[in-house]
Every structure is written in C-alpha cells, then in structure tokens.
Image: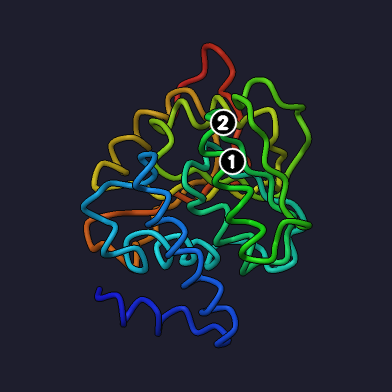
Amino acid sequence: MTEQEARAALDVPRETLARLDSFAALLRQESKHQNLVSCGSLDQLWARHIYDSAQLLRFAPPAARTWLDLGTGAGFPGLIVGLLHPARMVMVEPRKLRVDFLRRAADLLGIAQKVEIQCAKVEAIPAIPTEVISARAFAPLERILASGARFSTAETVWILPKGRNAQTELEAARASWQGAYRLEPSLTDADARIIVGTGVHRRAKGKRAR
C-alpha cells in the first residue's frame, strides 16, 4: 500500500487529514531526538502506522465509550483511534520522553480533552473496566492478556494487531487464556493478522483448551 492509497483509504474530512499531516510532521521532527518508530518506516507513516492503526476501528463497537491502549509508544493506535473514534482513550506509556511527545501530539490533533495519557507501567494504573483494549507492537500475546486482564469484562473487545506469527501466538495463549478469538486479515500487510477476542479470562487451573 502506497502513502497516497493509505491517505485515500482513511476516507476522513479534509480537516482531519490536515491534523494528521501536522502530526506526521511532528513525529518526523521528534524522531531526530528519540526513537519513536523505525527509521525505515518514517517515509511510510501513513501506510505503516496511521492507516494501520485506523483499520482497527473495523472491530470496535461504534458506541464504545472507553478504550485502553497498552504500551502506546509513539501513539499507535492510541492517538489515531482517539482522533477517529468517540470513545475516551486511555493511553499507557511508561517512558517520560514518549509521554511528553504524546501530550504535544494530542494537543496538536485537538484531542487533549478526550484522551488520558498515563505515564506508568500497566501494572501501576487503577483497574477500571473498559470496553475496548488494544496493544500494538507491545509484547507477546500472553503477556498482553496478562497485563490487560484486570481491565477486561465479559463484554470487552480485545483488538490486537500481530504479524505473521499471530496464529502461533494465539494457539500458545489458548492454553492459559479462555475466550472467543478470531483472526482477521490486515489491510496493510498481507502476511499480518489482527487477533480479535471477547470473553477473555484466565483459564482455571487444571482445565485445558479443547
């Protein structure tokens, strides 16, 4: 997918595109001072990061009011979802330099009042139930589930983009984590998959996945 194709696929108002252009410029500038995304992807921000984050909205309830993004990093998908979805977004990122960047970016995107940026490890923030949980390039699947489980309810939708090893990670996680999972294709990478799960909870000891 080219940058032009990714911009067109977003299908958002011109004003939103302008905000995202400003955000992309800020990210490129800040990347001179800290490692936000891989250097090789700086010329493919729209396809590799912006649209790659926006595609997760396909699996989120449109009326969801709360969304938790674990290990937000440079703001993917947290900032993009915060701009494009009405849910209140909570982003968790323990590195202060990245949090400073996230706060400047949220202000630039005009969403500072509807997002909350926690400068902490996931284990240190209050366990408030949330309707959607996402994590992108954060950790192996089992660790993501363990980190986010205390925020999850029976109705919580987990949206977890993974690479070509998604099926293997999911099969390994099923031994410890029960739930209804499915693998969805990525629109930006033919080899990647997105794990979508509901009813996620730790499997009782002694019970094995069937």
Residue situated in front as seen by the camera: 110 or 163: 110
Q: Is residue 208 above or below residue 141?
A: above
Secondary element at image label 1:
helix
Dot 2: element: helix
**Residue closest to the eye, 204 or 53:** 53
State the image quarter where residue 117 is shown. Answer: top right
Percent coordinates x, y for residue 185 in the rendering: 34, 62
Report which residue position mark 2 lands on. Answer: 96
**What residue is shown at x 63% (from left), y 43% (from top)?**
91
Residue 142 rendering spot, x and y as whole percentages: 44, 27
Three-letter code, disc 2:
Lys
Which of the colour schemes (rainbow, by chain, secondary structure, one colour) is used? Answer: rainbow
Point out the image quarter for the N terminus.
Answer: bottom left
The residue where tag 1 is placed is 100
Numbered-mark total: 2
Residue 112 image-quadrant placement: bottom right
How far apart marks 2 and 1 lie (CA) works out to 6 Å
Between residue 76 and residue 145, name the one nearer to us: 76
Residue at image position (47%, 59%) is 26
- The kind of residue on which mark 1 rests is Asp
Instruction: State the quadrant of the C terminus.
Output: top left
Residue 17 screen position, x and y as percent: 51, 79
Q: Residue 103, image x and y in percent? A: 63, 48
Q: As drawn, is 66 to the left or to the right of 9? A: right
Name which residue lies at 44% across and 52% down: 182
Q: Is residue 119 left or right of residue 136?
A: right
Q: Is residue 149 above or below residue 181?
A: above
Q: Answer yes or no: do the residues labelled 2 and 1 have beta carbons within 8 Å?
A: yes
